[in-house]
């Protein structure tokens, strides 16, 4: 593994040359969405210009090319996360759709008295679908809490013989915590429950191998890993996907159709009704090529260095409270903080005036904000193109916030 050449990496991202309000762009919002390198933009443009056609429907040249490119992207994603087969990769619109797919499909068999276990650390996308499922079926929703240090408070007794599904986040989008899910997976499998992991933040930033994780299903999204919006992934063990009924009905997901009844195609086609996001999947494949070429271990090492630098830099500013683990060990490149006496929206506005782009609000994780007694947080999130100079710009911006608000 060679150290990441961040200057060379940055040269692949045209948007990083922009100025905002007369200042160089400092983009610290990659947990929200990442930027796209020219390698991804060029592949998508080439597809639209040279091979655009629908997939799995035509025998003509363009249709064949399009189908090949689409299925090649599936194979690339499978290899990237260590899936046993490309057939274990279901393309969705995003992580939210992937989680809803599981909730509707697996959840169809739940009954009154069954249990679903999540955590207080979840993105709303991994809370609301399960709430809706429990309302429909009469199942009970339970959850792990969060410690003062920002880690999961794993009480294994919460998972009982009645537990059917456990769905928890692998890396928090607001606290940056990378959860050790091994105990949760082991306990869930002990009682016969299935485990879904929300890997929206971990797959873009860490070396991920689904066999090592041990879960039955994982969900992640393309736009957080240098790919386009509109494309997400549900990975599932083949036996689990085979056991799941369809989520949507329509073209491409069928085996045979008569006026009396329909039989369904095997996974992944069973879950990909209608025309899929073809160019977006191809763009995701190009993003996987780019990340693989750099090496996920090198990317993670760089982000740990940046995160450690950010944690120390923010800790040196009076009045700043950082949420989540206090060291880069066990956390990813996401740091949420509070500036005493200043609403995060005001923090974000002043930072934007200086060209520093962060996210403010509850980050679709309102229960986490409530757990730490704040209405909202300011979040800086990093990626392979983040530099220490940008962290210094963030610190200067926070000092400016304090000066403006006294």
Image: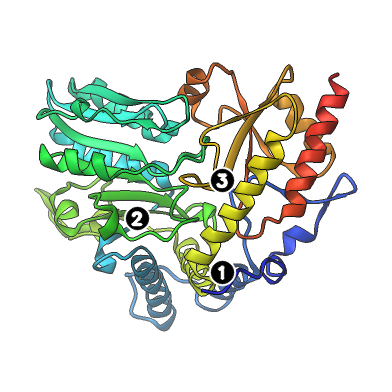
Q: Please state the horizontal and vertical placement of residue 278, each as a whole percent of the image.
A: 45, 64
Q: CA gap, disc 1 to disc 2?
A: 21 Å
Residue tagged by mark 1? 44
Is 229 on the left or on the right of 73, as rendered? Answer: right
Q: Quadrant of residue 294?
A: bottom right
Neighbourhood count class around disc 3 (C-alpha, 10 Å): few under 14, some 14–19, many 20 upward: many
Residue 99 at least partly seen: yes
Closer to the camera in the image, 47 or 232: 232
Neighbourhood count class around disc 2 (C-alpha, 10 Å): few under 14, some 14–19, many 20 upward: few
Q: Which quadrant does the C terminus fall into?
A: top right
Mark 2, mark 3: which one is toward the viewer?
3
Label of residue 31 in the image: 3
The structure residue drawn at horizontal position 60% and vertical position 39%, both measured from the top left corner, is 335
Is 380 on the left or on the right of 122, as rendered? Answer: right
Q: Is residue 185 above or below residue 146?
A: below
Mark 1, secondary structure of its residue: helix
Mark 2, secondary structure of its residue: loop
Label of residue 274 in the image: 2
Q: Please state the horizontal and vertical placement of residue 241, each as a whole percent of the image.
A: 19, 53
Q: Quadrant of residue 398?
A: top right
Q: Please state the horizontal and vertical placement of residue 90, each as a whole percent of the image.
A: 31, 57
Closer to the camera in the image, 398 or 347: 398
Q: Are marks 1 and 2 in contact (CB under 8 Å)?
A: no
Label of residue 120 in the image: none
């Amino acid at each position: 593994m060679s150290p990441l050449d961040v200057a060379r990496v940055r040269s692949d991202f045209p948007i990083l040359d922009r100025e905002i309000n007369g200042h160089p762009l400092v983009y610290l919002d990659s947990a929200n969405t990442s930027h796209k390198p020219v390698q991804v933009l060029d592949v998508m443009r080439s597809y639209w210009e040279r091979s655009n056609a629908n997939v799995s429907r035509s025998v003509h040249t363009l249709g064949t090319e399009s189908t090949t490119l689409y299925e090649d992207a599936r194979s690339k994603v499978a290899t990237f996360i260590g899936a046993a087969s490309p057939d274990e990769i279901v393309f969705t619109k995003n992580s939210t759709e992937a989680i809803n797919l599981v909730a509707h499909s697996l959840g169809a068999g739940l009954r009154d008295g069954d249990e679903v276990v999540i955590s207080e650390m979840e993105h709303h996308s991994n809370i609301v679908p399960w709430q809706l499922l429990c309302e429909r079926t009469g199942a009970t929703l339970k959850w792990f809490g969060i410690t003062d240090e920002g880690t999961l408070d794993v009480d294994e007794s919460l998972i009982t013989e009645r537990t059917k599904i456990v769905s928890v986040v692998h890396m928090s989008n607001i606290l940056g915590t990378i959860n050790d899910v091994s105990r949760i997976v082991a306990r869930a499998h002990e009682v016969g429950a299935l485990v879904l992991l929300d890997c929206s933040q971990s797959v873009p930033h860490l070396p991920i191998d689904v066999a090592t994780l041990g879960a039955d299903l994982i969900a992640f999204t393309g736009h957080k890993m240098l790919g386009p919006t509109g494309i997400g992934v549900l990975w599932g063990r083949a036996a689990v996907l085979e056991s799941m009924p369809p989520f949507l009905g329509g073209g491409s997901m069928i085996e045979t159709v008569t006026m009396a009844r329909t039989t369904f195609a095997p996974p992944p086609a069973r879950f990909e009704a209608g025309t899929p996001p073809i160019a977006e999947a191809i763009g995701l494949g190009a993003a996987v090529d780019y990340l693989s070429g750099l090496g996920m271990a090198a990317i993670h090492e760089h982000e740990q260095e940046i995160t450690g630098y950010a944690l120390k830099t923010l800790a040196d500013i009076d009045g700043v409270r950082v949420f989540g683990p206090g060291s880069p060990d066990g956390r990813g490149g996401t740091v949420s903080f509070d500036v005493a006496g200043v609403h995060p929206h005001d923090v974000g506005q002043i930072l934007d005036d200086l060209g520093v782009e962060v996210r403010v609000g509850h980050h679709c994780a309102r229960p986490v904000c409530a757990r730490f007694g704040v209405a909202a947080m300011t979040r800086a999130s990093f990626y392979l193109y983040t530099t220490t100079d940008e962290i210094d710009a963030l610190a200067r911006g926070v000092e400016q916030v304090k000066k403006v608000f006294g």
